[in-house]
Amino acid sequence: MGKVKCATMRRIDFIFILMLLTVPVRIFATAQAPDILIYKGDTLSIFANPLELLYDNDSIRPKYFGEKEACMTTACWRAYQAEWTIVDNDLFLTGIYSCCYYEDSIKADLSKLFGDKCINGKVKADWVTARIIAPQGKLLYYIHDGYSSIYEKELELNFIKGQLAGTNIYDNSKTRQSAYSQDSKKLKECIYKNINWSVVPSLDDKIIKLFVQFSANESGVVDSAKIASGNESGLNEEAVRVVKNIPDWDVFYIHGVLQRRTWTIPIIFSEENRKKYSE
């Protein structure tokens, strides 16, 4: 954000329902604009909002910008972005800016908000006891939800009452996306062309839909699959078999640890699919 007084920052198609089941529902509906942390001369984005730790609920949240109406967006639900600075291992709040600061130039007056706790444009953040993650390196997997996207590395900063107690670096570089998860047509062809249609009895006008839940190991091999919904004797095994034969699937590492995410995919047995894919 330019130079200011308090030092500113610098398908639902085939996969019909292909659905990530391991990620819990969050208050976020979209990827969020991060707060900023200045640390050892670098300006970092952080997957955290330490200012929120001050308030139990929105009813006691102060009006950061007085009577000015700062903008709020789906990517900035809190209607502000804060800047933080680490000085001699202590964490300081050094700025609160409107989500649209470049357009509206609205920023908070820290001295009015914090009184004598604001010294030389800085407020010691002694209320922060938390683990804060700063993503680093390449974006490997974008997730349209809060601070869920996966980056090549993560810098973890651990604070106790506003003092930096330690850091860790996590390597997520083994994270990768499969062509089958990214290309619904490719996945559809992989599934239906590998069904052994000779074991599927004549269905006439009947359509059978089975949902298979699956996950992959650190090599992207689908090694776990089971029927999650639907039941059809003789077809359950075939549905599981073809899903376990998907050549490659996504691999996720978060905080340097493999995350076995569970997905659910529908397999539709119909005469239309038999005719289209068994030739």
Image: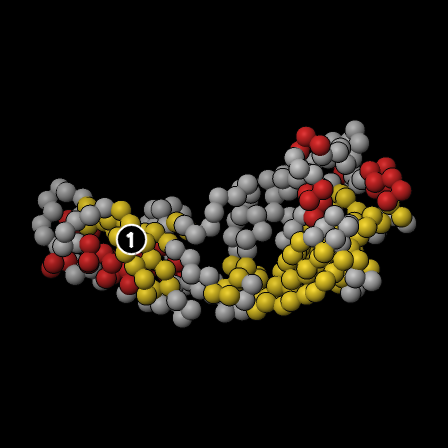
List x then y, in percent, for residue 249: 38, 63
Query: Which of the 4 quarters of the picture holds residue 79?
Result: top right
Q: Residue at x 68, y 65 (%)?
A: 167
The residue depicted at 57 percent of the width and 69 percent of the height is 171
Residue 97, quarter of the rendered image: top right
Q: In the rendered picture of this protein, how many numbered marks are placed on residues?
A: 1
**Left or right, residue 268 beside residue 6:** left
- Crowding at dot 1, Cα within 10 Å, few <14 / some 14-19 / many 20+, comes out as many
The answer to whether 188 is drawn above or below residue 115 in the figure is below
138 left or right of 95 in image: left
**SS assignment at label 1:** strand
Amino acid type of the residue tagged 1 in the rendering: Val
Percent x, y for residue 11? 40, 47
Q: Nearer the viewer, residue 278 or 135?
A: 135
Q: Left or right: where does residue 278 sit relative to residue 245?
A: left
Report the coloring of the rendering: secondary structure
The C terminus, quarter of image? bottom left
Q: Visible in this render: residue 275?
A: no
Q: In the image, what residue occupies the spot 69% across and 44% down? A: 53
Residue 37 in which image quadrant = bottom right
Q: Position of residue 104 (x, y in %)?
A: 76, 38
Residue 63 appearing in the image: yes
Instruction: Give coordinates of residue 39: x percent, y percent.
Output: 76, 61
The residue tagged 1 is: 212
Horizontal relation, residue 35 to residue 229: left or right: right
Closer-to-camera residue (276/67): 67
- Residue shown at the point (71%, 34%) measured from the top left: 61
Q: Nearer the viewer, residue 186 or 8?
A: 8
Residue at far front of view = 161
